[in-house]
Image: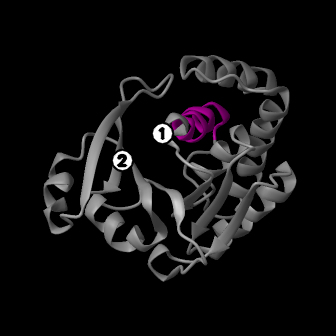
Amino acid sequence: MSDVSIRQRLASGAATLGLTLSDQAFSQFETLVSELQRWGKRINLTSVLESDEIVKTHLLDSLTAAPHLAGDQTLDIGTGAGFPGLPLAIINPQRQFTLLDGNGKKISFVNHMIATLGLSNAIAIKARAEDYAPANPFDTVIARALATVPRLVEISAHLVREDGQLLALKGKHPAAELEDLTAFPEWEYSVSKLTVPFLEAHARHVVSLRRK
């Protein structure tokens, strides 16, 4: 898939999501795709290495979370190869992003991408969420396919500001997981359906959790 078609696919998908990408953002996304492929041949970053699949399953899937962000400080836990944190940082230069993962090789890649893309609004830290102790909690903590919803609350509640939110990006509606939230009565939640452009047949949901 050429850079032109990557740009076309991104432009079409972003428009479906109500997003307008700048020329700089397009260039950054193209670089992210090529570097993910280059690094992915050497280390296990992701099983998805074909350009069109990267655009759909990593970039556009990450961007579906954009309307749900709140506040200036966002923490992406279990970011892996930088998703959803890197795409969200690219289109939100006014927000600060911290990308967290316990895998050193993946954090090396994320640090490389932050430097290569010139993302002054992003940092990467090698740590597990349950062990991370930042100076200040975050407005939004987000996780993409990392753990069950109750487990996310368990490992990241200390990272969410008192009036902040925890966003869990999930596949199918996690009804069974939500039933288990009774163990955390101080949290309330809402579920929104997400539609990923070009992956409409695949169920996607975001669970938004806040303290009562």
- Label 1 SS: helix
Question: Does the magenta-highlighted stretch encompass residue 62?
Answer: yes
Question: Does the magenta-highlighted stretch encompass residue 25?
Answer: no
Task: Locate residue 127, reporting x and y percent.
Answer: 57, 77
Q: Magenta stretch?
A: 50-64
Query: Which residue in the structure is indicated by mark 2?
Result: 208
Instruction: Report the residue at 53% width, 69% height from top.
Output: 137
Mark pair 2, 1: CA separation? 8 Å
Q: Is residue 117 left or right of residue 100?
A: right
Task: Locate residue 156, reporting x and y percent.
Answer: 41, 69
Q: Is residue 179 left or right of residue 53?
A: left
Which quarter of the picture shows residue 103?
bottom right
Amino acid identity at mark 2: Ser
Query: Which residue in the structure is indicated by mark 1?
Result: 68
Which quarter of the picture shows residue 114?
bottom right
Q: Is residue 148 left or right of residue 75?
A: left
